[in-house]
Image: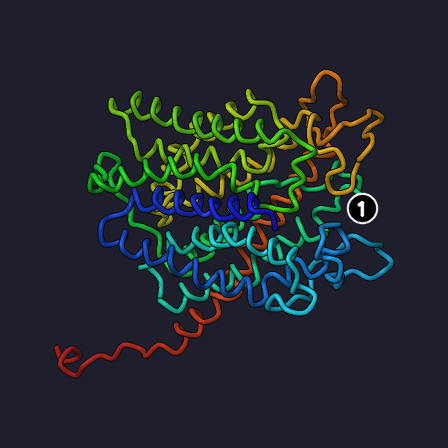
């Protein structure tokens, strides 16, 4: 593994740290302590689960789809669909458990190292919002479940040669699902698992008067959120560069890094203007949440869209951030103090759909084994949405359909996989809870 790739994989840990600091910035001091513990729990539980069995589930069949050195023996991919459906409907890898056997190579180790920051981020998203409000066993289960099962299976569908990546070959839907930086795999899946925890464990908040002021967090917490925003900007390029399966030869790496910063800038600016217009003061915490949402929304499309499009989608999700946070907190009355459902969930969905709208065709030729030489009759045309560059043909609505199918599949899988493991113990606890008794004194008039 080249030294540059090792350095990039190491710097990528700035990204989950940045998201953690932004999440903590909006919590009361007592809850901030729980959130800090959650970040460490995500590192330990998700990392352990991923190395133990997650890598095998994600990349056990990667040798069938990728030519990366060291993956040649990882060729065991399972599908629920029979051979009559054809190849490319993979759903889970079945070899490489514990990074042993076929996975005991430098290429497999590099792949596992690059995915650890991603899986830790996916596990931290639900843990940060739920820790301190759900039982300790449930926190541990969510972290382990995301790292060992949920993230790896979803990752197999996108990066391991699974069915979402092959929507283009099997169903003619563009280049298949495009999610270069994890808008869906990391953020949407993590937020969906968090939503399952919210609905299973926490009651809806009581209604409060519209004029009731929200208490401000201690001053040092928003400052930590601003620090987290800086870490996101610094770690973003490494988040992509550490992935050995990300073929940077098919797109301009400098445009990817520029788009990351522009989307973050747009995401931060609009909440500042909105809070100043509505409340007369700017809110730094809301701005950092908008910035985080901007990085999430651009993650899937960063290498495939023009800079103006990155700024546009960042600004759009930045404007939506305070509005949707209000909707979640005051209309739906869901307990989401870290705003993960908005910052990671909404932005994850919009990030996937942005590819189908803004991908201009300059980048991604040959992505998911589609159109390496030409696509739609045009040489070197890459991933393309509706707003194609002048010399390319729009791939509409095929690419948008692939993105929509992927967004729906990832959201539903993340939610129901977490709900399936969390809801039965809670239901059994309610069934076997002792009934309250009434004393004789209370019965006597």
Residue 359 lies in quadrant: top right
Report whether 334 appears left or right of 211. Answer: right
The figure's colour scheme reads rainbow
- Of 69 and 404, nearer the camera is 69
Is residue 154 rendered to the left or right of residue 428? right
Foreground residue among 231 and 19:
231
Q: Quadrant of residue 307?
A: top right
Please name the residue shown 70% across and 66% down the image.
Answer: 102
Looking at the picture, how far across and down is residue 256, in whole percent? 57, 31
Residue 162 makes an appearance in the image:
no
Q: In the image as oriented, which residue stretches furthest toward the right?
A: 84
Q: In this view, does 216 lie above or below 53?
A: above
Disc 1 crowd rating (10 Å Cα; few below 14, some 14-19, many 20+) is some
Residue farthest to the bottom, as pictured: 440
The quarter of the picture where residue 324 lies is top left
From what the image shows, is residue 437 above or below residue 81? below
State whether residue 166 is above or below residue 394: below
Q: Which residue in the structure is indicated by mark 1?
A: 170
* Residue plotted at (38% across, 55% down): 39
* Left-right relation of 328 to 184: left
């Amino acid at each position: 593994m080249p030294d540059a790739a090792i350095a990039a994989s190491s710097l990528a840990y700035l990204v989950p740290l940045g998201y953690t600091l932004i999440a903590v910035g909006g919590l009361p001091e007592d809850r901030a302590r729980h959130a800090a513990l959650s970040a460490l729990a995500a590192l330990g539980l998700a990392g352990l689960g991923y190395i133990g069995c997650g890598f095998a589930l994600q990349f056990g069949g990667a040798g069938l789809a990728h030519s990366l050195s060291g993956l040649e023996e990882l060729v065991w991919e399972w599908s629920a669909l029979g051979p009559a459906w054809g190849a490319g409907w993979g759903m889970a890898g079945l070899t490489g458990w514990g990074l042993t056997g076929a996975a005991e190579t430098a290429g497999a180790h590099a792949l596992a190292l690059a995915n650890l920051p991603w899986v830790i981020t996916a596990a931290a998203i639900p843990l940060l919002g739920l820790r301190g409000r759900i039982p300790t066993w449930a926190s541990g289960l969510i972290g382990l479940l995301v790292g060992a099962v949920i993230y790896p299976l979803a990752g197999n569908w996108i990066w391991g040669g699974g069915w979402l990546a092959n929507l283009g070959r099997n169903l003619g839907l563009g280049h298949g699902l495009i999610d270069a930086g994890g808008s869906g795999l990391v953020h949407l899946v993590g937020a969906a698992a968090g939503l399952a925890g919210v609905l299973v464990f926490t009651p809806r908040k009581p209604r409060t008067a519209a004029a009731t002021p929200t208490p401000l967090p201690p001053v040092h917490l928003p400052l930590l959120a601003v620090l987290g925003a800086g870490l996101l900007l610094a770690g973003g390029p490494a988040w992509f560069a550490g992935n050995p399966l990300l073929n940077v030869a098919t797109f301009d790496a400098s445009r990817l890094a520029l788009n990351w910063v522009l989307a973050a800038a747009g995401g931060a600016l609009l909440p500042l203007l909105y809070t100043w217009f509505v409340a007369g003061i700017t809110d730094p915490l809301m701005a950092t949440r908008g910035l985080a949402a901007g990085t999430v929304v651009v993650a899937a499309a960063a290498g495939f869209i023009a800079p103006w499009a990155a700024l546009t989608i960042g600004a759009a999700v930045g404007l939506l951030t305070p509005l949707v946070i209000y909707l979640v907190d005051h209309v739906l009355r869901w307990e989401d103090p870290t705003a993960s459902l908005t910052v990671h969930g909404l932005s994850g969905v919009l990030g996937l759909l942005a590819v189908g709208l803004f991908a201009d065709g300059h980048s991604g030729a040959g992505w998911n084994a589609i159109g390496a030489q030409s696509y739609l009759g045009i040489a070197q045309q890459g991933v393309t949405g509706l707003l194609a560059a002048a010399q390319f043909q729009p791939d509409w609505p095929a690419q948008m359909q692939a993105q929509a199918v992927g967004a729906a599949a990832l959201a539903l899988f993340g939610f129901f996989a977490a709900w399936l493991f969390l809801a039965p113990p809670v239901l059994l606890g309610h069934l076997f809870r002792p009934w309250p008794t009434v004393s004789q004194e209370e019965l006597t008039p």
